Image (tube, helix red, strand yellow):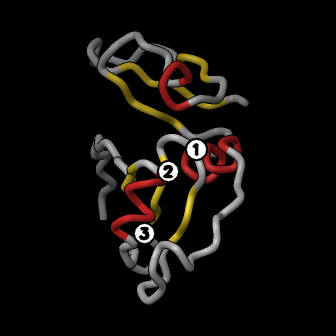
Amino acid sequence: MAEKTVNVKLRLRTDSAGNWLNTNPVLLLGEVGIEADTGKIKIGDGNTAWRTLPYCFVRKEEILDLVFPVGSVKTTLTENNPGDSVGGTWQKTTETQNAELKFWVRIK
């Protein structure tokens, strides 16, 4: 089967700590909830309400390593370095025949 790259934006469920407490939702299994004002994260199990779920203590760098491990390639249509938006250290690779596409590899 041929590989196909699809450019998508991933947005995680985010709200203030107060709103999470007031609504007290049950996150789906594996669903991530972020407190926008504290930066704290909880991951749902499909059964437990927000107030009872424990916080997930993981550093931003660890999340970056899971989503974009060192050596991964990101394709962009602009000259913007992906590190400016997603973090990490990226290096532009050689130009391709398609002048619109820019390939970046994460080096750190």
The circle on residue 6 is none
Q: Vertical placement of 45 versus 100: above or below?
A: below
Q: Which mark is residue 38?
A: 1
Against 80, is 83 above or below? Answer: below
Q: Quadrant of the N terminus?
A: bottom left
Image x and y of residue 39, in percent = 58, 45
Q: CA distance from mark 3 to mark 2?
A: 13 Å
Distance CA(mark 1)–CA(mark 3): 18 Å
Corner quadrant of residue 71: top right
The answer to whether 28 is drawn above or below residue 93 in the figure is below
Q: Which is nearer the N-term, disc 1 or disc 3?
A: 3
Query: Could you say whether the residue bearing mark 3 is in a helix, strand or loop?
Result: loop
- Residue at image x 39%, y 50%? 15
Q: Residues within 10 Å of mark 3 (few under 14, many from 20)?
A: some
Looking at numbered disc 3 in the image, what kind of residue is underneath it? Glu
Residue under label 2, please give it. Answer: 35
Dot 2 falls on a residue whose secondary structure is strand
Which of the numbered marks, if any, corresponds to residue 31?
3
